[in-house]
Amino acid sequence: MKRVLVTGLSGTGKSTLLEELSRHGFKCVDTDYDGYCGPADGSPPPTPEARPEWIWRPERIDALLSTEDAEVLVVSGCVENQGRFYPRFDHVVLLTVPAAVMAERLRHRDTNDYGKDPGELAESLGYIETVQPLLRQGATLEVDTSAPLAEVVDAVLTHLGQRPDQPRSPR
């Protein structure tokens, strides 16, 4: 089974890309939800969606990456301890976007509220200088998601060795 991590800062399009890859027949898991991540101290998450200071729960990610129930598993997330799991991924796809586009997306997103608060927005934009370079170091592909979605999907599919013009069927 091929394992792919889609990562990037908030507002870069991870959820949107995951939705599209799912339509192409890939098994997709957004680790921002369903208990895959939480506060570093191990306490229960106070909100249903991830926050910047959260980490992946190692036992949950280990179990997920140990599954063999699909030809391709696409996992999305951006957490402090994700680098620990890079050796288990065949590809690490970094999504990036210019700061102005990121700010616009965060202000108007409807998937969760993170980034709508001015302090959170400023924090997210600051991560372009501090976190994004670290993500770039481990990436096997970087895609600017200010391009049309179809082009982003095609670039990722091509990187994964898939034919972009042909939807996949589940295994």
Image (spheres, rainbow, N blue to C red):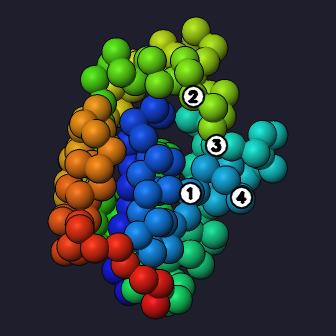
Residue located 63% across and 32% down the image: 110
Badge 3 element: loop
Q: Which mark is residue 134?
A: none
Residue 69, relative to residue 151: is it above or below?
below
Residue 131 x, y percent position in the rendering = 35, 33
Query: Is residue 88 among the parts visible in the rendering?
Result: no
**Foreground pick, 116 / 123:** 116
Name which of mark 1 and mark 2 comes first in the sequence: 1
Name which of mark 1 and mark 4 comes first in the sequence: 1
Residue 84 x, y percent position in the rendering = 41, 61
Are dots 1 and 4 in contact, CB under 8 Å?
Answer: no
The 10 Å Cα crowd at callout 3, few under 14, some 14 to 19, many 20 or more, is many
User: Closer to the camera: disc 2 or disc 3?
Assistant: 2
Q: Which mark is residue 30?
A: 1
* Residue designated by label 4: 35
Instruction: Kindly identify the amino acid type of the residue bearing the numbered disc 4.
Output: Gly
The 10 Å Cα crowd at callout 1, few under 14, some 14 to 19, many 20 or more, is some
* Residue designated by label 3: 50
Instruction: Kindly identify the amino acid type of the residue bearing the numbered disc 2.
Output: Arg
* Residue designated by label 2: 109
The CA distance from mark 2 to mark 3 is 15 Å
Badge 2 element: loop
Instruction: Kindly identify the amino acid type of the residue bearing the numbered disc 1.
Output: Asp
Name which of mark 3 and mark 1 comes first in the sequence: 1
Q: Which image quadrant for residue 155?
A: bottom left
Name which of mark 3 and mark 4 comes first in the sequence: 4
